[in-house]
């Protein structure tokens, strides 16, 4: 690899660690994920109410269109948090579509070239038993 400014040879970058679960994990409707998507360079793009309303409208429309239940969300000035379950499409696909549509909106209405960081943070929430689950286990014994 060569430095584009100086032309000097430099050591190759270390391979990035894969932080994702297997793709099929993001398609399991029984799983709940805590997702955080940051604005590029943690810029305060979401400090404008009208823009926020349009971003949330896109999020809600995609959730309905793909049958993806959003348990709760919070759009902060620099990022978005949400608890979400996969629907008929993988969360990877839904998030990609959300980032594309909101990125297009940002370019058209706010002259923002790159709205989101390249990836997103996620953690899968543990599944909890409900009282009905416990009752059905008791009767099955």
Image (cartoon, helix red, strand yellow):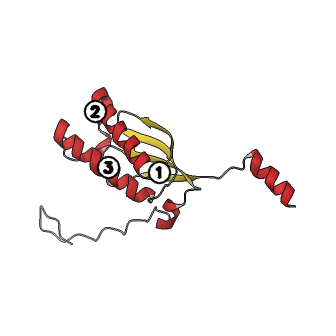
In what quadrant of the picture does the N terminus appear? bottom left
Query: Do tag 2 and tag 1 residues touch (Cβ < 8 Å)?
Result: no
Residue 93: x and y, percent?
38, 58
Query: Neighbour class for label 1 at 10 Å: few (<14), some, many (≥20)?
Result: some
Q: Is residue 44 visible?
A: no
Pair 2/1: label in front: 1
Q: Position of residue 22 (x, y in %)?
A: 49, 67
The residue indicated by pointer 2 is: 51
On the image, the x and y values in percent for residue 6 come to 12, 63
Q: Residue at x 39, y 34 (%)?
A: 76
Instruction: Tell me which corner region of the image, top left, top right, bottom left or bottom right, holds residue 4.
Output: bottom left
Given the current orientation, which residue lies at the most extreme top position? 49
* Residue contact at pointers 2 and 3, CB within 8 angstroms: no
- Disc 2/disc 3 C-alpha distance (Å): 14 Å
Camera-nearest residue between 34 and 41? 34
Q: Residues within 10 Å of mark 2 (few under 14, many from 20)?
A: some
Q: Would you place residue 107 above or below residue 140 in this image? A: above
Left or right relative to 137: residue 10:
left
Instruction: For the residues labelled 3 and 1, say whether their Cβ atoms are less than 8 Å apart.
Output: no
71 horizontally vs 48: left or right: right
Does residue 46 lie above or below 101 as drawn?
above
Mark positioned earlier in the residue sequence (2 or 1): 2
Q: Residue at 39% across / 54% down in the picture?
A: 94
Is disc 3 surrounded by few (<14), some (14 to 19) or many (20+) residues within 10 Å? many
**Circle 3 sits on which residue?**
99
**Is residue 11 placed above or below 135 in the rendered structure?**
below
| Quadrant assignment, res 47 | top left
- Of residue 73 and residue 121, the one placed in the foreground of this image is 73
Q: Secondary structure at mark 2?
A: helix
For mark 1, give the secondary structure.
loop
Provide the residue designation for mark 1: 67
């Amino acid at each position: 690899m060569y430095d584009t400014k100086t032309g000097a040879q430099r050591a190759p970058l270390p391979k990035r660690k894969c932080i994702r679960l297997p793709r099929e994990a993001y398609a399991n409707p029984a799983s709940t994920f805590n997702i955080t998507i940051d604005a590029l360079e943690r810029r305060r793009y979401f400090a404008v109410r009208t823009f926020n309303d349009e971003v949330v409208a896109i999020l809600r429309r995609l959730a309905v269109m793909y049958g993806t239940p959003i348990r709760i969300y919070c759009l902060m000035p620099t990022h978005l948090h949400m608890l979400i379950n996969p629907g008929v499409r993988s969360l990877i696909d839904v998030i990609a579509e959300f980032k594309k549509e909101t990125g297009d909106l940002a370019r058209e209405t706010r002259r923002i070239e790159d709205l989101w960081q390249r990836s997103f943070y996620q953690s899968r929430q543990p599944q909890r038993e409900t009282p009905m689950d416990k009752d059905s286990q008791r009767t099955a014994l």
